[in-house]
Image: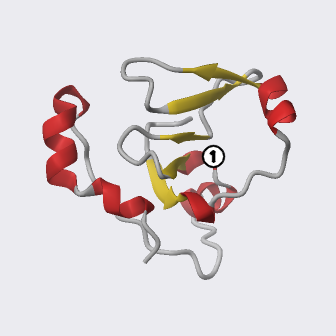
Amino acid sequence: MRGNKHLIIPEEDFTLDMSLEELEDISTLYLWGTKTAIRRFCNTCGILPWYRPRSNPDGYGITYMCMTEFQQQQQDQRPPNLPQIEFRSFDGQNWEECFLKSNIQKESKTS
């Protein structure tokens, strides 16, 4: 379901409608590598609906296909007023080099 396509947004644009206790009950925290990225996987289906990415620790990565509006768009039922999304490839094998070239860190800044 995830397909590893995600949107990066500023932290102040992210709201979670549940308490930390509820979140901990329904998900599993997973840290690896540098432990900079914070990921919580759903205990029911295993999906990663959002996370705090290593590239943007001041924002969130939201999994594209977990967003109802974009699932509808895939079925040619595009809701009105959806923003345009540009997908770019990211070479995770050469993470540091790709990170520097991508300027992805600007995506979590408020414009």
Using a 10 Å C-alpha cutoff, classify the residue at mark 1 as few (fewer than 14 neighbours), some (14 to 19) or many (20 or more).
some
- Residue displayed at 16% across by 30% down: 94
**Residue drawn at (75%, 51%) of the image:** 16
- Picture residue at 75% right of the left edge, 21% below the top: 43
Read off the residue under disc 1.
66
Total numbered labels placed on residues in the image? 1
Where residue 25 sits: x, y (%)?
Answer: 84, 24
Disc 1 marks a residue whose amino acid type is: Cys
As helix, strand or loop, the secondary structure at mark 1 comes to helix
Between 109 and 27, the one lying in front of the other is 109
> Visible in this render: residue 18?
yes
In the rendered view of the protein, which quadrant contains the N terminus?
Answer: top right
Q: Nearer the viewer, residue 96 or 88?
A: 96
Residue farthest toward the bottom in the current orientation of the protein:
81
Observer able to see residue 87: no
**Residue 67 horizontal/vertical position (percent):** 64, 53
The C terminus sits in image quarter: bottom left
Side of 50 where 58 appears, left or right: left
In the figure, is residue 75 to the left or right of 106? right
Relative depth, front residue between 31 and 68: 31
Residue 35 rendering spot, x and y as whole percentages: 44, 24
> In the picture provided, is 38 more to the left or to the right than 103?
right
The residue sitting at 82% across, 52% down in the picture is 17
